[in-house]
Image: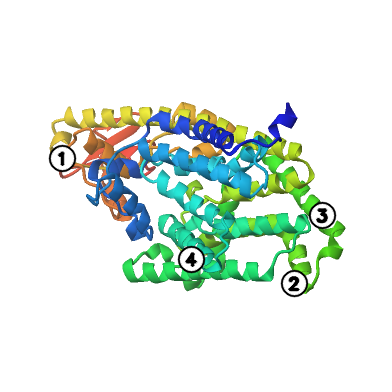
Amino acid sequence: MINNLTSHITKEKGFIISLLLSTLFAYPIINSGVYYIDDLARSQTGFLGWKSLGRPLADYIFYFFSFKSRQSVDVSPLPQLISILLMALTINFASDKLFKFRSISSVIGSSLIFLNPLFLHNLVYRYDSLSMVLSISSCIFASLTSFNNKKIDFIIKSVLIFSSLCLYQVSAVCFIMICLIIYSLSLGQGIKVEVKRIITDLVIVLSSYGLYFILIKATTNNSRSETIFTQDNWTQLLMVNLNKFINLYSGAFHRPIEALILIATIASVAIYTFCIINRRNEFKGYIQKTLAITLVLNPILLLVASISTIVILKESLILPRIATTFGIVILYSACMLQLQSKKISLFYSALVVFGSITISFALAASMKDQYQKDLLLVSQIKSSIEDDDILSKSKTTAFGVARESLVAHNNAKIFPVVSMINSRVYDGTASIMLTRLGLTGVNFSFDRKKWMEIAISVCSANKPRVENSDFSIYNSEKQNFVFLGKRPTQCL
């Protein structure tokens, strides 16, 4: 039985297995039927907005879906279904090129690129999932594709990395990470890594990033690109960002799988170290020896690479969706373990993939329950306003965050990543949903500090016109102030 899982399979069978794994992983999210945060606004307004965030190609995807109408169109779940297909193609391609032997074991191992809990955050977006998957796939194909014509090879790889940056910037570092794994696999098998290859890879990366920054500087003015190094307290900001990443990565899996990944990583380092010691006489020259020794630290190098483009930003939104390369970090162990035993690599990969699929179902159930609860909550707010003579003649602004649903709360105890991804209705989404349900006079401002000061001054001097455990509504001068969940302590 185990031998069949590690035996060679055809390209077609590999694709079918890749498609099955990708579908099992993404189907629960699609089936939950949730409009996730930005999806709510885009479904109602047709707004794109990715270009202003330095992601121009993400806009062009929806130019295609909307037949060049320059607005987003809700064709869900089509983008997510295409994402599944693209994930399967990428996994099948990587299983052959990275593991050098296509088998069920190598397919499962390669699926770790996408099949990890943090990547679920990328898939929950009805509109944005495709561009995020494309950004990773572009780098995978760039790092594992090789052409005999060096000029064509250089151009195609540069274009793919540049495209990845224009789709979702944080994914482009995937190219460097895959290259590091390839170097380790080569040296572990006694295969020389040409210095020319390393230099070419570096030039490809630098030229792609350089061209991207030139384009972005000329076309956008995005404050999110400002680094922490412009601040006097940049060391403190760096530590804060690093701590956020530690919490993010450590909460991706539940404890048993975390322990498995740690053990597999230690074992991988040991296997690689043993390999280069045995082959030490095959490494000729200072550069080869230095590279071989340096790559003993590859797990750390991969971790640093995966967070490098985010921790240095002043406005670091450290959420699961920006950890698109987390799968490459855990892929390393699957690759190195197979140098020693394909069966051990299969055992490791299968357990991690099973854990990821299980978390997908738990997250989908949590999101669905949360969305239904939030929709009922917003409907109750709308009814409370429309049934009150004073509230119905006033404008409405929401504040705060709704309570977590019972299903989401329970699932998050076992799978912490659920609470990281599950989105409760908050001021912005509440305003959108109230408008969606037909309430007139809803106003919302991103100047939250100013409006919160006004709201507290009102609620601290007046009793609520509507009050229950889920929300309270205050009114002053034809303005409704809706507090979701627990209201501020200053309020009466």
Q: Amino acid at mark 4?
A: Ile
> Residue 242: in sight, yes or no?
no
Q: Position of residue 355 (x, y in %)?
A: 61, 33
Left or right, 288 with respect to 382, comes to right
Front label number (2 vs 1): 2
Asked if residue 141 is positioned above or below residue 280 in the image, the reply reads above
Q: Viewer-proximal residue, 474 or 432?
A: 432
Residue at left offset 74%, top offset 29%: 2
Image quarter of the C terminus = top left
Ranked by sequence position, the earlier of labels 3 and 1 is: 3
Front label number (3 vs 1): 3
Q: Which residue is mark 4?
A: 155
Residue at left offset 61%, top offset 55%: 178
Asked if residue 358 is positioned above or below residue 338 in the image, the reply reads above
Left or right, 361 with respect to 286, comes to left
Is disc 1 surrounded by few (<14), some (14 to 19) or many (20+) residues within 10 Å? many
Image quarter of the N terminus = top right
Examine the image and state in which quarter residue 159 appears.
bottom left
Callout 3 secondary element = helix
Q: Position of residue 323 (x, y in %)?
A: 53, 50
Which mark identifies residue 275?
3
Callout 1 secondary element = loop
